[in-house]
Amino acid sequence: MNHALIVGAGIAGLSTAWALVRRGWTVTILERGPLPNPLAASSDHHRLIRWHYSDRVGYAARMGEAFAAWDDLWSDLGTRHYVETGVLALSTLEGDWTEVSCRTLDALGVPHERLSVADAIARFPHLDPDLDARFASFTPTGGALMANRIMASLADWLRAAGGEIHTDTPVTSVDPFTGSATTADGTVFRADTLVVSSGVGAPAFGLPGAPDLVPTGSTIVYARPPADLEQAWEKAPCWVDLGGHDDLWGIAPVDGLPAKLGMGILSVPGDPETERIATQERVARILGAYRGRFRSIERFSVETAQRNFYATAPEGRFVLKRADRAVLLSADSGHGFKFGALTGLDAAEAIAEPDRFESVARRMAGLAAG
Ligand SMILES: Cc1cc2nc3c(=O)[nH]c(=O)nc-3n(C[C@H](O)[C@H](O)[C@H](O)COP(=O)(O)OP(=O)(O)OC[C@H]3O[C@@H](n4cnc5c(N)ncnc54)[C@H](O)[C@@H]3O)c2cc1C
């Protein structure tokens, strides 16, 4: 039986393990922390899944497959860790991110609604009544993937299927020629294929031919609307791009959680070991940026704020690269969770069918069908 050794139990490593087990492989996973590891890019209550992708047609075109892959996973797990809220985007300037996204959705035949600002405010009363925008774009599908629950369920499924998962087991070096990994206590694990899916930890292994993966810090704020606005938020959709240049994105209150407020332009390279504090200044900038977009944002109460890191690859593309018996997998660049289950199916296809490796890698990079 073919055997894969997987370094890193984020969504990419766990999904690849799931898809390989479905193909009859055995898997061993080595994870440096607990599972889920709060320091992993994948770790949080939830991650956004949405269709809007502006001019990144290669990724927008794969969203249908991404949703289908999650459905495959739900059916194996016997539970659905997904809250569908729909997703809203706003256009404030001609030819901006949202307007280009709408053109892409039209070209791909993806259902979406274009709403006047007055209609958007009437339908979504959490929006600021003085909202200054050209139009709103809404997809009825998309929403919150419950990330930590997905990873915990995947781990349970893998263990039940005979997979071995070693938590609190940092890998200190890998050898692509022998397909082996050495852990901090000196134990050597070996397999037919070694998958390095260790996120911001991957560059430390110095795999030959690996592209630059830059650790990028992103701050998010969890904040609750005031009691008198709770009803206005009840059916609020998640959002991506609320116009302007600050790249606002976030997740509506779901499952008893506060709203999650993000701001893309605050995502900058940094050191994941030492720069994890969500400073007051960043929190204030994020809340301030939502003024004029969400009603009475100044009355929201902040519950927590976090700074977490993802690995940015050149051009923000997903990376699948082979070096002898090792495969480097980084389907991240800050937008990888939504593709998680599909990434696993893709990576398993490339690993189990080596003739298809390069075409799958191009497909994952959003460059081609194959
Ligand atoms: C704040 C934030 C918000 C985001 N929001 C979204 C979103 O809304 N939608 C979306 O689609 N994407 C989003 N992303 C991106 C998405 O979360 C990532 O693309 C995805 O989770 C990457 O998964 P991964 O498995 O490649 O990496 P990771 O989740 O980082 O997993 C890597 C694993 O490897 C382990 N590891 C590292 N080094 C070693 C070692 N030496 N030995 C053993 N194990 C090791 C780590 O502990 C970790 O568990 C966001 C990312 C961040 C940080």
Image: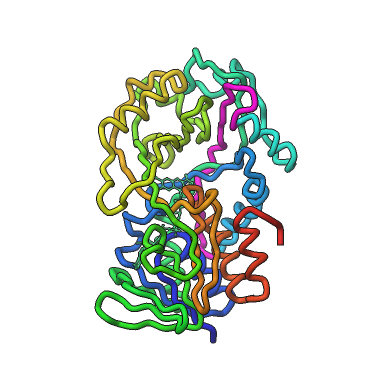
Q: In the rendered image, which quarter contains the N terminus? A: bottom right
The answer to which quarter of the image holds residue 306 is: top left
> Could you tell me which quadrant the C terminus lies in?
bottom right
7 to 88, vertically: above or below: below
Residue 232's x, y, as percent? Answer: 46, 23
Report the residue that reaches farthest toward the bottom. Answer: 1
Magenta stretch holds residue 356: no
Q: Residue furthest top?
A: 130
- Total number of numbered labels? 0
Its colouring scheme is: rainbow
Q: Which of the two residues, 335 or 47, is positioned nearer the viewer here? A: 335
For the point 36% across and 45% down, which residue is it?
A: 217
Report the span colored magenta: 76-97
Q: Which residue: 47% across, 35% down? A: 249
102 lies above or below 336: above
Indicate the quadrant where residue 221 lies: top left
Residue lying at 31% horizontally and 33% vertically, measured from the top left: 282
Image check: 73 left or right of 187? right
For image coordinates 55% across by 64% down, the residue present is: 320
Answer with left or right where residue 300 lies relative to residue 15.
left
Q: From the viewer's side, name the closer residue of 127 and 96.
A: 96
Residue situated in front as seen by the camera: 335 or 124: 335
Measured as percent of width and height from the top left, residue 352 is found at: 60, 76
Image position of 133 with respect to 215: above or below: above
The relative height of residue 76 versus residue 143 in the rendered view (above or below) is below
Quarter, ligand 1: bottom left
